[in-house]
Image (tube, helix red, strand yellow):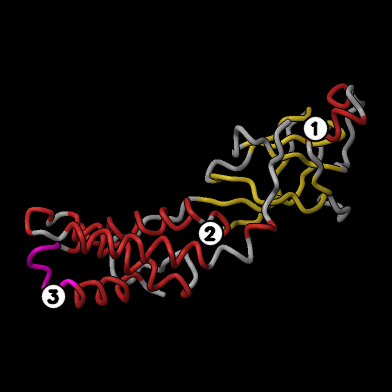
Amino acid sequence: MQAGMIITRVRATLLDPSGVYWPDPELYDYLSAAQTAVVNLKPDAYALTSFVTLAAGVMQSLPAEGSQLLDVTRNAGGTAIREISRAELNHSNPAWPAATPAPTILHYMPDLRNPLVFHVFPPSDGTSSVEVVYAAAPPRVAQATDNLSLPDVFETALHAYVCALALAKNTDRGDLAKYQAFMNQFVQLVQGKSQGQFPEAPKMETP
């Protein structure tokens, strides 16, 4: 879906087809913010999958564009990696961080306090890579022909968010209630699409 489709629909809703009150750069800025807002509520709305070369040791980082870990699926050689809570591993093997480094990872642990990092067991020897699924910030859009990063199912949610921000500009004209209505619609649409998928994300149990 191209960005211009959303903006055309927004302009029809705002009764501003020629961009007299809301110029294009402003609405495209709102649309970029809308995509980011969707990902903030539903991280897997814009999920990327790539192989990440591991650093030596237990602590690992997401790629630079990552915003939250969703899953660590397998070693580059094909062996599956299982999620485990740090509390469980601490209980069964308190010395796990000092285990002998290895090229094959058996388990990963999300970090409750820092979604940009995760831990692995056994510690990596720094020679291997693993497949990581992570949420990322969608690229910004600036013109009609730019492709949106989110699936088409979020069209109405994006429309609602852009309308909300546009109407927030008009609080002196009594549009605050309309702003709130569109923002509530946005949240309901995005959260409604989350119910069946969030259980698959890392549990991120307290260490």
Neighbourhood count class around disc 2 (C-alpha, 10 Å): few under 14, some 14–19, many 20 upward: some
Mark 1 lies on residue: 87
Q: Position of residue 190 (x, y in %)?
A: 47, 63
Viewed as shown, does residue 151 lie left or right of 99? left
**CA separation in Å, label 3 and label 1:** 56 Å
Frontmost residue, 194 versus 68:
194
Is residue 52 shown left or right of residue 194?
right
Instruction: Provide the residue span drawn in magenta.
Output: 14-22
- Residue 122 in the image: state x and y as whole percent: 87, 34
Q: Main secondary structure of the magenta part?
A: loop
Quadrant assignment, res 1: bottom left
Q: Which mark is residue 15?
A: 3
Q: Give the residue type that dot 3 points to.
A: Leu
**Pair 1/2: label in front:** 1
Label 3 and label 2: CA atoms lie apart by: 31 Å
Who comes first in sequence, dot 3 or dot 1?
A: 3
Q: Is 200 in front, or is 61?
A: 200
Q: Earlier in the sequence, mark 1 or mark 2?
A: 2
Q: Secondary structure at mark 2?
A: helix
Q: Secondary structure at mark 1?
A: helix
Front: mark 3 or 2: 3
Residue 195 placement (x, y as % from top left): 59, 64
**Of the image marks 3 and 2, the number of the one nearer the N terminus:** 3
Instruction: State which quadrant residue 62 falls in.
Output: top right
Residue drawn where x is 36% and y is 58% of the image = 34
- Kind of residue indicated by mark 2: Tyr
Q: Quadrant of the C terminus?
A: top right
Assess whether residue 106 is covered by the magenta stretch.
no
Report which residue position mark 2 lands on.
46
Quadrant of residue 162 in the image?
bottom left
Q: CA distance from mark 1 to mark 2?
A: 30 Å
